[in-house]
Image (cartoon, rainbow, N blue to C red):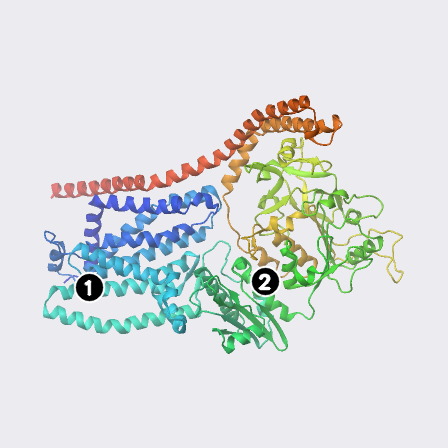
Amino acid sequence: MRTWGAGTLAVLRHEWRALTANRLILVFQGTFLVALSALIFLVADFYSGDTASPALLATFLPWVALIFVPALAMSALSEESGDRELELLSTLPMRQSSIVTGKWLARCGLLTVTLALTFPFPLTIAYLGDPDWGRVAAVYFGGVLFLAALLAVALFSASMFRDQIGGFVSALAVLFILVALGWDAMARLLPEDHAVVLLGLFESVSPKYWFDRIASGRIELAALIYFMAVPVLALWGASMVLQLRCGASLATRQAAFGIGKMLPVVLACAFAIASADRHDLAFDATDEREYSLDDATKKVIDRVPTGTVIDLYWSAGAVNVPASIREHARRVTGLLEAMASRSEGRLQLHKHVPTPESDQEFTALRAGVALVPMSSGDSFMLGATVRSGERQSRIAYFDLSRERLLEYDVALMLASLGRTKTPRVGVLSPLVLPRHARDGSGSLAVIEELKRAYDVAVIPLFDESLPEGIDALIVIDATLLKSKMLCAIDRHVMDGKGLVVLVDPHVRSLPSSNEVTPQPSEEINDISDLLLRYGLRYEFSDVVGDETLATPVADTGGRQFPYPFWLTAGAGQLASGESVTAGLRTLLFPEPGHWALTSQTAAPLVWTTATAGVLPRTGFAASTAEINAGRFEARPGGDPLVIAATARGNLQSAFDAGCSTDDGAAIGPSEPSARVFAVADVDWIFDNFAFQTDGGPQRVPLNDNATLFLNMVEAAAGDGSLIGVRSRAPTRRSFTRVADLVQAASQTSSARSKEIETRIAAVESTISKIPAAAGVETFDQLSPEIKRQVETLRQDLLPLRRELRDLRKEIRQTAEDLGRRLTLANLAAGPLLVLCQWWLFGWLSNRRLKRCENVTSEV
């Protein structure tokens, strides 16, 4: 009898040749690829999602495989009338396990090739945006393991039936159960008393559960053990079933003996998976090392005092908790376990499973952990407390909307234990009232973020001094300040403390601010005069626009057009060498101003492109966005304009004479630790521009605006140790190609659009002046003749508006046409690639036959 390896290799070669020569495989592969592409591009509408991620492939692959894998496995071990292949193989001197393994390997190869033929999808992602290639590789690696495991189970199920229909139905039923066990809906069928144990058991059995974990970009040892164990056990079982089907007494005894040996192997595999999962051994495949602890976090953990305890409260037994929350809870638990392991015993993690009305729930509530309600009427807990001696801190709820900041939140909680004093941040602004420090501001979620880490003091606008112990001061749109307050701010900076200033030539959030704006001068009258002495001159009269960085906005008719005065700045406009901007991806500045750097102590943080232009702030608010867009012109031979800047080091006091401290001492040069941040925009930190809301209390970051603001405050407060942790938080990767395409299309038609918008603005301006020229207040008071003239002017506007609408439609049509072409290309790519593969296999087969014929003729 042949050895196991030789027999397996012989069956593998035979099966591979039979599969690649079967024309039905063309239908199998083509339908597989078309179905997967249709689900991704048509059902899920990948193009409209504007996310450069392979997540949809991982979402739909299990459900497509659920149908196609049983179809591929059903004929492998069948014994229908006229099909004597299995009988013939059984007469050969080889083991049953070699037959089963060879057939499995051949079909695994076919499934792997089929999955590889989906490569147009990642190419499409790369064409549209900048994908995380580590995550893409993890999806494909996990997909191969997942398909191989499903195929092995399908072969085992099909082996119990001699006919193909029975094999297909049984394999489909078994695979559906296995895949469904890793689906959130199964949790609703479990009794609450045993939900924790049963749900964990069911999930660990499902290949979908382990595939999802690998597809996230984290390749775990437990998942690898699972995907090795399942095929081995399934193929072993299929081999024993074949022996039983032979009917010989010896074969029956061998099969029975094999079943007896399988039980301890199953238990050993289960123990190995559980042990590997408990020790959390994994490889982080993501480009940004999303699942690895940051160096700054490691330093925080290394400073944790001995005896520190984290109590995690997670309602794992609540069966109605959505799958997204469960997965988030799993990541929270994994992060805390990794931190505890890193601490070498100084940090201990205690996990609690609170149930309704239990002592653990009451303990958690007393400690400040939140009870989160669900739409079903039930509630759950997912929070933690950390204590070290008499000091205690907490995270009331690990909000899913803050998943990208999970590591930062936990590191900040641990860092707070080592502080002897919580840094104090002062906020001086007409937009932030003293009550906001206690009750929160409905439109400024960044203030709530500040309160997570600092003692926030809101300073009344017309105070004459700063509170004691302020480590960093934030000045937002505070134009009218008393001279003594300006002196106090200057002394604050000269003492080596931080200052963050936000000014704006066109404030949307508080239009009344536009009546008075800071204007740098030789005298110290407002905050811009201080900044001028520090090397930052505020160009108060300009509103900055940039067609290259234009952001799509809606016009009065609800149609989108690129608005050059809302700047979307990418990595190319950010200072990579500065800690506060390093690692950021996207910032949005609505109608900002700009700075001129007048000293070597100043440096740019965010800037425009060379195509930037400006409009006078006077009259800007009175015009519509369409009119202002039509008035935009790039400055000839222009240089990039600085939107945000910093000044640091030994800064000179703004008061050479005439201002002194309360003790009469003159203010001298600053300490080297002084650092000033200045942004020529105010609206960028408001929720409308920094967060995406769903109508509820959750605030999902829309961009990196809040991150940059908090980084500035943290650096100004003198402790930037966690800036890197916050900045490296992964953000959504959008389709940059689409944005560039729309931008290019808008620039092509910009000249004509500007001409039309200018003519429309001129006619509208003429119409608006008619009542005053006629000596009346409203249009209704005009004479019939003048009304007819007004109506004629309005009718003249219709062709212009129609042409402008068509131009903007062409811009949108360009992006929509790209989406249609990509969708059709991906749908057609599968069948075309299958035909190319068929031709390649045929060509290789013909070459092999010719070689055999040549050898035969020579003999």
Q: Using the rendered image of the protein, determine whether residue 10 is visible from the camera's viewpoint.
A: no
* Residue under numbered circle 2: 296
Between residues 170 and 7, which one lies in front from this camera angle? 170
Q: Using the rendered image of the protein, determine whether residue 653 is visible from the camera's viewpoint.
A: yes
Between residues 654 and 10, which one lies in front from this camera angle? 654
First in sequence: mark 2 vs mark 1: 1
Classify residue 215 as left or right of residue 709.
left
* Residue 759 spot, x, y in % from top left: 64, 26
Between residues 436 and 245, which one lies in front from this camera angle? 436
* Residue under numbered circle 1: 239
Q: Please, is residue 686 above or below residue 809 in the view?
A: below
Instruction: Name the amino acid type tagged 1.
Output: Ser
Instruction: Name the amino acid type tagged 2.
Output: Ala
Crowding near the residue tagged with mark 1, few <14, some 14–19, many ≥20 C-alpha atoms within 10 Å: many
- Name the secondary structure under disc 1: helix
Q: Quadrant of the N terminus?
A: bottom left
Classify residue 639 as left or right of residue 847.
right
Task: Give the spatial CA distance, label 2 vs label 1.
Answer: 53 Å
Q: Quadrant of the C terminus?
A: top left
- Name the secondary structure under disc 2: helix
Which quadrant of the view contains residue 675?
Answer: bottom right
* Residue 328 spot, x, y in % from top left: 48, 62
Which quadrant of the view contains residue 423?
Answer: bottom right
Residue at 73% from the left image edge and 45% from the top image edge: 512
Classify residue 344 as left or right of residue 474.
left
Residue at 74% from the left image edge and 36% from the top image edge: 618
Q: Are marks 2 and 1 in contact (CB under 8 Å)?
A: no
Residue at 26% from the left image edge and 59% from the top image edge: 173
* Residue 491 spot, x, y in % from top left: 81, 57
Q: Please, is residue 628 above or below residue 146 in the view?
A: above
Marks 2, 1: nearer the viewer = 1
* Residue 379 spot, x, y in % from top left: 49, 67
